[in-house]
Image: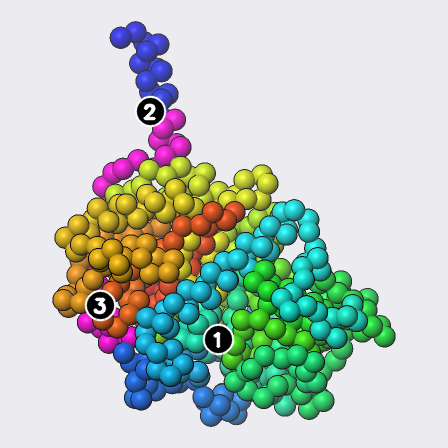
């Protein structure tokens, strides 16, 4: 073979290595991980048990309030804040009357999750096409109002068909406790307010602005009002509207208020006081936006970082949401990237995936944002199940099925459950070994998922499904099932995301 031929061969080899992650045995992580089937099934039964012991109670919030020591401005960037984080089961425990059994609860969760995906996809589509949110017509038409054209506990919100996590936040002065959805896919903070033209049912009384000494309407010329995607002016006061792609919406006055998070109060936080609200929020009083836009809570706080640890979706335990705390020393870090077309979402720099210690043949471009703003993979607290582009998902699923031949797929009748297409009957097992699924990052770091983040029970009788799903949307999503029992830290100052395995 000539020297020129050798050079051509070498170029081809190098080119292939740059564009594809080749199948090879990885040394960074073990090839299998153990799933405790018995413990997982016990949790599904505990959700409906009378011995379920929720940690999120009004009394717990009152104890936090009594410890209040700090009062901060919304631009405080150096003070650490901690807020408890809970599952929705901690304050709205499901019952056999409301859901029948764990499988019907799972179906409700997955329906909610599909609506969430539609919402995120619609919002990205609007940003990429230049369509205004005001062009959306909320389901059921517009109400009268529309015609006027820190550390704290985190709670899992899936037990009533919602995929979100919640915190108990004090609104106003004196603080009125309210459950707020925590959402990394949203920027505008808001809650339902009296008087209500149209409000959905929530766990707490509707917030009364007249009872707060710190309630202050924003004028139309303020920077906060001008930062809204959709706003109107009435008597020189700012009105806001947020329409979500699933048909949910909130409309009302845009104001500043004092928010109490754990032991600290933050003054002058821009927040929507919604008098006309409709959608899939069920139970929560409103939403605390943790996205990357100007109006999100971290942005208003001028936070250099924030992190959360999500407890198991069926747990009655609490964990924490923290602001301005350093990355844990053992964190597996990945690049935090942004889409120039939309500043809300947090994109993760991913270079590949592996199953059972073997990397998948997936081009790195499958995880990158293109010049048009499409593609990439975001991390989201509100989406439950990780969605991967269809070809990527098929590669992962096929490799996982190959590695679980000994388990055997569930019968054809039960093999698919809602959006899951790969399920197993583990009713006769106490524990099983399954292939380790891992995310690989450009810096060489590897995030290996625990078995409980990969195979999840969909009923109480032993059916477990691969907790990933395909999507044809413009981006992929790392969902909260894959984030559970992991502290996820957003180092905004250094553009890093850190993952630390922990029991929360």
| Residue picked out by circle 3 | 462
Residue name at image x 44 percent, y 84 percent = 91
Tell me which numbered mark, 1 or 2, is placed earlier along the sequence. 2
Classify mark 1: residues with Cα within 10 Å, few (<14), some (14-19) or many (20+).
Answer: many
Q: Quadrant of residue 53?
A: bottom left
User: At x 43% / y 76%, what residue is drawn?
Assistant: 160
193 lies left or right of 86: right
- For the magenta stretch, what is the residue range? 15-44
Please rate how many residues cluster around mark 2, counting C-alpha atoms within 10 Å: few if below 14, some from 14 to 19, many from 20: few
Dot 1: element: strand
Image position, residue 188 (x, y; %):
63, 67
Measuring from the top left, give residue 175's x and y in whole percent. 60, 87
Q: Quadrant of residue 105?
A: bottom left
User: In whole angstroms, how far apart are the C-alphas of marks 3 and 1?
Assistant: 29 Å
Which residue is denoted by mark 2 in the rendering? 13
Judged from the image, the secondary structure of the residue bearing numbered disc 3 is: loop
The quarter of the image holding the N terminus is top left
Please give the label number shown on residue 166.
1
* In this view, 205 is above or below 251: below
In contact (CB < 8 Å): disc 2 and disc 3: no
Of marks 2 and 3, the one in the foreground: 3
Number of the front mark, 1 or 2: 1
Classify 153 as above or below 323.
below
Regarding residue 381, the answer to whether it shows in the image is no
Mark 2 falls on what kind of element? helix
* Relative depth, front residue between 299 and 194: 194
């Amino acid at each position: 073979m000539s020297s020129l031929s050798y050079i051509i061969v070498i170029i081809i080899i190098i080119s292939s290595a740059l564009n594809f992650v080749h199948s090879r045995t990885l040394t960074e992580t073990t090839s299998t991980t153990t799933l405790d089937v018995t413990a997982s099934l016990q949790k599904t039964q505990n959700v409906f048990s009378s011995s379920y012991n929720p940690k999120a109670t009004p009394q717990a919030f009152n104890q936090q309030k009594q410890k209040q020591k700090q009062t901060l401005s919304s631009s405080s960037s150096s003070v650490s804040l901690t807020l408890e984080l809970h599952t929705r089961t901690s304050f709205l425990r499901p019952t056999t009357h409301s859901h029948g059994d764990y499988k019907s609860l799972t179906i409700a969760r997955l329906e909610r999750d599909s609506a969430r995906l539609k919402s995120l996809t619609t919002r990205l589509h609007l940003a990429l096409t230049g369509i205004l949110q005001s062009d959306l017509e909320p389901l059921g038409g517009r109400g009268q109002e529309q015609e006027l054209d820190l550390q704290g506990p985190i709670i899992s919100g899936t037990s009533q068909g919602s995929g979100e996590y919640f915190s108990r936040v004090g609104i106003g002065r004196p603080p009125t406790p309210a459950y707020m959805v925590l959402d990394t896919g949203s920027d505008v903070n808001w809650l339902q307010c009296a008087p209500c033209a149209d409000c959905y049912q929530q766990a707490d009384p509707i917030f009364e602005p007249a009872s707060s000494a710190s309630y202050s309407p924003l004028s139309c010329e303020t920077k906060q009002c001008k930062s809204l995607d959709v706003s109107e002016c009435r008597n020189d006061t700012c009105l806001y509207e947020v329409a979500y792609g699933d048909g949910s919406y909130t409309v009302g006055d845009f104001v500043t208020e004092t928010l109490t998070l754990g032991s600290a109060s933050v003054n002058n936080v821009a927040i929507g006081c919604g008098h006309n609200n409709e959608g899939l929020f069920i139970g929560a009083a409103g939403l605390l936006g943790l996205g990357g836009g100007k109006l999100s809570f971290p942005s208003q706080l001028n936070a250099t970082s924030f992190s959360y640890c999500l407890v198991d979706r069926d747990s009655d335990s609490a964990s924490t949401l923290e602001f301005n705390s350093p990355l844990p020393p053992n964190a597996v870090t990945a690049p935090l990237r942004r889409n120039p077309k939309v500043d809300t979402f947090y994109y993760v720099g991913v270079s590949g995936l592996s199953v059972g210690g073997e990397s998948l043949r997936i081009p790195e471009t499958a995880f990158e944002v293109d010049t048009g703003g499409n593609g990439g993979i975001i991390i989201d607290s509100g989406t439950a199940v990780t969605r991967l582009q269809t070809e990527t998902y098929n590669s992962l699923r096929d490799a996982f099925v190959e590695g679980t031949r000994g388990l055997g797929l569930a019968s054809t009748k039960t093999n698919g459950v809602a959006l899951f297409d790969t399920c197993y009957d583990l009713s006769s097992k106490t524990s099983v070994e399954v292939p380790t699924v891992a995310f690989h990052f450009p810096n060489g770091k590897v995030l290996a998922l625990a078995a409980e983040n990969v195979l999840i029970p969909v009923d109480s009788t032993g059916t477990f499904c691969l907790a990933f799903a395909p999507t044809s949307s413009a981006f992929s999503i790392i969902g909260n099932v894959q984030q559970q029992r992991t502290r996820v830290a957003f180092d905004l100052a250094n553009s890093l995301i850190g993952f630390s395995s922990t029991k929360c």
